[in-house]
Image: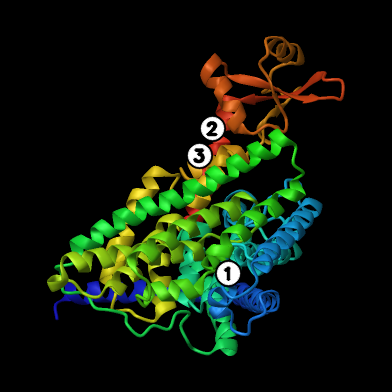
Amino acid sequence: MTQSTRTVLRNQLNQALAAIKDAWKVMLRRGPSQIQFWFIALAIGIAAGFMALGLRKAIGSLQAYLYDTQDILLLHSHAEKLPWFMVLIIPIVGGLIVGLLLNKFTDDGRVRSVADVIEGAAVTDGRVEVKAGVASFFASLITLSSGGSTGREGPVVHMAGVISTWVSNRIHADGITGRDLLGCAVAAAVSASFNAPIAGALFALEVVLRHFAVHAFAPIVIASVAGTVINRLEYGDVTEFTLDTPGSLQFYVELPAFLILGLICGFVALLLMRSIFFAEDIGSHIQNRLSVPGWLRPAISGAMLGLMAIWFPHIIGVGYETTIRALTGDLVLTTAILFAVTKTVAVAITMGGRMGGGVFSPALMIGALTGLAFGLIATGLLPDVSGTHTLYAFAGMGAVAAAVLGAPISTTLIVFELTGDWQIGLAVMVSVSMSTALASRLVDRSFFLTQLERRNVHLAAGPQAYLLAMLRAGAVMRPIGDDRSITKDEAQALIDQGLCVQASATLEAAMPYFDRDDIPCIPVVIVDDDGHETPVGALYHVDALKAYNRALAATAAEEHS
């Protein structure tokens, strides 16, 4: 060994020892607090897991009581045999209770769901509304138990956010910690709901936090595993859908068919999302036009659902029975298409009527029906080169759900974990990629982000679009009297020209003044009860840009830590 080689090896060894010493110092300094945080994540995961399990059990018990059946997995078949007036009355009463509950405990009669949790993660340091969230949880429980046509993932995700908010407020968590705890709670809730630990963790990262920061991964996984354990203690290590005919892919011959299926599912997902938004707009227009009380709106939707359920009982609740029938090929072509159409209408009525619930489970059902219908046509046209039509139902289920959620990674994995069949991966991934690519171009990336965009919360475009709305003019201004600020008289002169913003206004509202009027600063005012504007400071363009840049840097640092 030459002298130069020994020198190189000695330097590398010294660098390795220095790195080990630095790591040891970091562990001594941060290790105890990090371990403590993991225990908090575990506790939140357990609490969120039991909450999700409790909702599932409560829905099952209440459904069994209201529809007088012992097996809720066969609820649709049993509802066909009930007197028609019972099928009609149950969702009306449920909607009336939901309306009264939301009218009392929310300021807008709107059910809180996944979109509000995403907003909380981005805008309010990982916090969500507590009182409205609890009311929404019970409203969704009543909706799903009494004939509403939605899913249970919406209420469990928001209630998980309520749990993490309570903990974050008690420990005075900062924004990063609050968001991490929110991700832990959501991961545990999703995992406990669907017995899907991998998908639960990735759902929290991909959909709610919308980044894959390393520092958040370990606690979120811990919480997700805790939620899964709670599910398996009750239900065992079984998949959500137990299937006998998973099907097989005929090598690569069928891949073009799955590409086409993905595009069709993208359009179906778009139709589902647009139907919900259309129903929401029409419902609000009619409510305002006819002066219908807000508490009565869910009951009216319940009446519409009851009328539909008399002829199409498959729209009731989450719809696992019909989804299983689609995945096992136990439906003919016309029935699959008809069920998909009526389910889409029912979901739009339920959510447009503000009855509560989530959109993921309906998307799974509609996707499975769409995939089955496509598979029946494809295998009928080319039987010699086609596998079984049930494989298309699997792919369709994932493709529609992924397009609605805007989450191709976690949705693909949740389909695998729901079915326990990892051999269908190629078909599912091809269809999911196409549907997501198409639908994300036609809406604001996902159903949830489009919901927020309709409320003027601009998260779809990324932090550069919404961070300005988080910064207040009063927090960035230079006070009147400061040597670096304008005088009171100068401020009043600008106010007289109509150039001013209130101290509570955001930088998003203030920045257009700089672009339009080409001025270095704008007065910040406080408006009294008489409407008089008193200048208290000046917002300088350069200060606003600096604050914006700091917020962008902090967000980037968190996402890459």
Residue occupied by mark 3: 465
Instruction: Tell me residue 51's x, y (percent).
Output: 67, 74
Residue 91 shows in the view = yes
| Disc 1 element | helix
Residue 25 shows in the view = no
Q: Quadrant of residue 541?
A: top right
- Foreground mark, 1 or 2, reads 1
Name the residue at 66% across, 38% down.
Answer: 286
Camera-nearest residue between 362 and 187: 362
Name the residue at 75% across, 11% down.
Answer: 489
Camera-nearest residue between 244 and 221: 244
Q: Quadrant of residue 551?
A: top right
Instruction: Tell me residue 538's x, y (percent).
Output: 68, 23
Tally of marks? 3
- Foreground mark, 2 or 3, reads 3
Q: Residue furthest right?
A: 530
| Disc 3 element | helix
| Amino acid on which the number 3 mark rests in the picture | Ala
Whether pointer 1 and pointer 2 mark residues with C-beta atoms closer than 8 Å, the reply is: no
Camera-nearest residue between 1 and 221: 221
Within 10 angstroms of label 3, few (less than 14), some, or many (20 or more) residues?
few
Whether pointer 2 and pointer 3 mark residues with C-beta atoms closer than 8 Å, the reply is: no
Instruction: Please tell me the numbered disc located at residue 545.
Output: 2
Instruction: Tell me residue 250's x, y (percent).
Output: 17, 74
Instruction: Please tell me the numbered disc located at residue 184.
Output: 1
Q: Earlier in the sequence, mark 2 or mark 3?
A: 3
| Amino acid on which the number 1 mark rests in the picture | Cys
Instruction: Tell me residue 534's x, y (percent).
Output: 80, 20
Instruction: Please tell me the numbered disc located at residue 408.
Output: none
The alpha-carbon separation of the residues under discs 2 and 3 comes to 14 Å
| Amino acid on which the number 2 mark rests in the picture | Leu
